[in-house]
Image (cartoon, grey):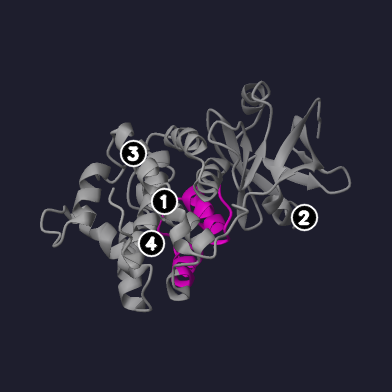
Amino acid sequence: MRHSIQVEGKFSSAVLPLLHSGEQGYVHSVFQNGWNIRMGAGLIFIGSTKNGKLPFGIHLEDTHVPELISLIKKDEKVLYDISMSSLLFSSFSIQLDPKDAYHSDIGLTIDQQEELLCLLNAFAAELLIHGQPTGAGISVDHFIECFIKEPHASCSDSERKVMQLMDAAQTQDLSQIDKVLRYWIGRGEGLTPSGDDMLAGMLAVDAVTGMFTDTFRLHLSELVEKEVLTTDISREYLKYALNQNFSSVVTGVLNALLQKDTDNLNERTRELLCVGHSSGLDTAFGILIGMLIIRRNSNWHKKL
């Protein structure tokens, strides 16, 4: 192999087991802002930080990305040299320095779930200002109205399915969980379907509150790991989310909520909403759903 180009990459510490597996990898998929390689049982994204730092990411300087993309080919072989701490492609290498590793967990937890609701109004307001429907065609404004009003006679079928998901997340009824998850996993278009992004947002709330049942988490994990219900890339996001690892645009929102920092929350939420065609909004909607579950459980007295 010739490695005429050598660049340095900042990487998620969560990808180290894949790199150290000793298995040969290959280029899985290529995009405008980077590419995925498959190493062992997982994917690793290599590229820019356009969508934040990913939980399975190796991130390069933006100026290097277009040139390196032009040099790679789909399915080309990739090796990781442990002695050199370098990922070797046919015409370039990416060196990884341990000091450039980052963590993709949220980092904070809370004792009382209600603590996460202090900025619920501010967070919901940013989604309402955004003014776009989710990838599943759900109006955030109308969903909130449906959630508050009883009975839910004016709700659309998709909105009712969201409320069924909210119920399933806190039940031990496996058949109920299975039915709802099979409806949402892989639902929608694109590399990360709307239903998966929504689930990832909900899991971010669960990561700091522990409010979902073990039955829900375990069955979601089984469906993601053992069945092919969605795209490879979306499965990867869900696998990491189930292990409480998220992209930096998601952890930024959760940390701002936990720190009760309104200005930072507004900024971080807008960054999340800019991700993808609807992925950011779908993930943010999932975070909102998680917060509304807490609100419902606590009979929180404040109104949106």
Tell me the residue that label 2 is attached to: 20
Three-letter code, disc 3: Ala
State the image quarter where residue 130 is shown. top left
Crowding near the residue tagged with mark 1, few <14, some 14–19, many ≥20 C-alpha atoms within 10 Å? many
Residue 124 pos. (x, y %): 34, 43
Instruction: Tell which tag, 2 or 1, sits nearer the viewer.
Output: 1
- Dot label at residue 294: 4
> Circle 2 sits in a helix, a strand or a loop, which is it?
loop
Residue in the picture at 29% in, 48% down? 304
What segment is highlighted magenta in the picture?
Answer: 217-246
For this orientation, the residue located farthest to the right is: 83
For mark 1, give the secondary structure: helix
> Given contact means CB atoms under 8 Å apart, are the residues at marks 2 and 1 in contact?
no
Using the numbered discs, state the Cα–Cα distance from disc 4 to disc 1 in whole angstroms. 11 Å
Res. 139 visible in picture: no
Residue to which mark 1 is pinned: 287
Nearer to us of marks 3 and 2 is: 3
Type of the residue with mark 1: Ile
Residue 28: mark in rendering: none
